[in-house]
């Protein structure tokens, strides 16, 4: 009986070590992300979330149309993928806790790419999320032209973003905020200010905002491989 217990103990230890090793290996996969965003939220322009631990309301509900220009997680390539991220940051993230993030991927994305993307995006948004959904699929339209930008989820019924870029005193040049970090990304080209009209409906969320915060931004980041 003692011998059986010893063998069982060794087996459990072996499994635990291998599970831990697998988890560490997964965390150590090298990853890179270069992406362009059409983004909007419920705050006034410009979002105070970047300077405080709370929004200008009791919530910060958002929509992001993300186009991955180039990316990978290990050997899985993410180039050309479009992703929609919607949700609510809540009203207080002084403890790094946020409410909900819902990821929608295009039908063309393989499950392997979805799994890989969901290893990368938490590095960009390193918060304690109350709920994360990554099972939705829908076509995503993404377009920037001149001083406007549009992103649409499916036929637009469940989500859309329309941005009108804000210009400076000359009435021509976009207003850009630089030297400001975008979440966990290592680099960005600046926040191009815009007024937004956006909405989202799904997963018990239903919101719509006009004349709200919006911006365009390109980010770059990388990690893993240690």
Image (tube, rainbow, N blue to C red):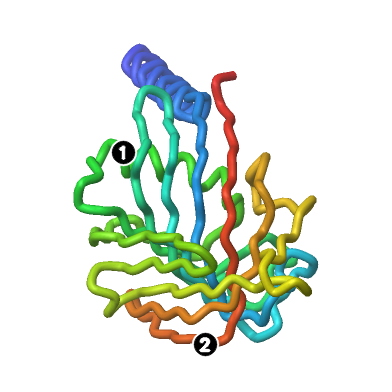
The answer to which of marks 1 and 2 sits earlier in the sequence is: 1
Q: Tell me where residue 180 sits by quadrant.
A: bottom right
Residue 13 located left or right of residue 42: left
Q: Is residue 91 above or below residue 108?
A: below
- In this view, the residue in front, 160 or 162, is 162
Measured as percent of width and height from the top left, residue 210 is found at 52, 87
Q: Secondary structure at mark 2?
A: strand
Rendered location of residue 138, percent (x, y): 24, 61
Residue 1 visible to an observer of this rendering: no
104 with respect to 131 (left or right)? left
Q: Nearer the viewer, residue 12 or 105?
A: 105
For image coordinates 54% across by 71% down, the residue present is 40
Compared with 81, 32 (above or below) is above
Q: Secondary structure at mark 1?
A: helix
Decide if residue 11 is on the left or right side of residue 166.
Answer: left
At a point 38% along the width and 74% down the height, the residue shown is 160
**Quadrant in the picture for the N terminus:** top left
Residue bearing the label numbered 2: 210
Query: 146 and 48: which one is in front?
Result: 146
Give the alpha-carbon distance from disc 1 to disc 2, as whole Å: 34 Å
Q: Quadrant of the C terminus?
A: top right
What percent of the width, then of the height, locates residue 139?
24, 60
Using the image, determine if residue 66 lies above or below residue 206.
Answer: above
Disc 1 marks which residue? 113
Instruction: Give neighbour class at mark 2: few <14, some 14-19, many 20+ (Cα, 10 Å).
Output: some
């Amino acid at each position: 009986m003692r011998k059986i217990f010893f063998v069982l103990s060794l087996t459990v230890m072996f499994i635990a070590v291998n599970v831990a090793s697998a988890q560490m290996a997964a965390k150590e996969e090298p990853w890179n992300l270069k992406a362009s965003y059409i983004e909007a939220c419920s705050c006034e322009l410009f979002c105070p979330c970047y300077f405080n631990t709370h929004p200008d309301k009791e919530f910060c509900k958002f929509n992001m149309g993300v186009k991955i220009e180039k990316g990978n997680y290990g050997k899985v390539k993410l180039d050309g993928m479009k992703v929609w991220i919607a949700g609510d940051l809540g009203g207080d993230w002084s403890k790094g806790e946020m409410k909900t993030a819902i990821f929608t991927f295009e039908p063309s994305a393989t499950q392997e790419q979805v799994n890989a993307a969901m290893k990368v995006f938490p590095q960009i948004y390193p918060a304690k999320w109350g709920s994360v959904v990554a099972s939705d699929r829908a076509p995503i339209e993404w377009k920037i032209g001149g001083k406007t930008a549009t992103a649409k989820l499916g036929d637009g019924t469940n989500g859309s973003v329309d941005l009108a870029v804000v210009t400076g005193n000359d009435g021509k040049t976009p207003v850009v905020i630089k030297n400001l970090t975008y979440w966990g990304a290592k680099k960005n080209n600046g926040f191009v200010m815009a007024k937004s009209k956006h909405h989202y409906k799904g997963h018990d969320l239903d919101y719509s905002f006009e004349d709200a915060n919006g911006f365009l931004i390109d980010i770059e980041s990388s990690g893993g491989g240690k």
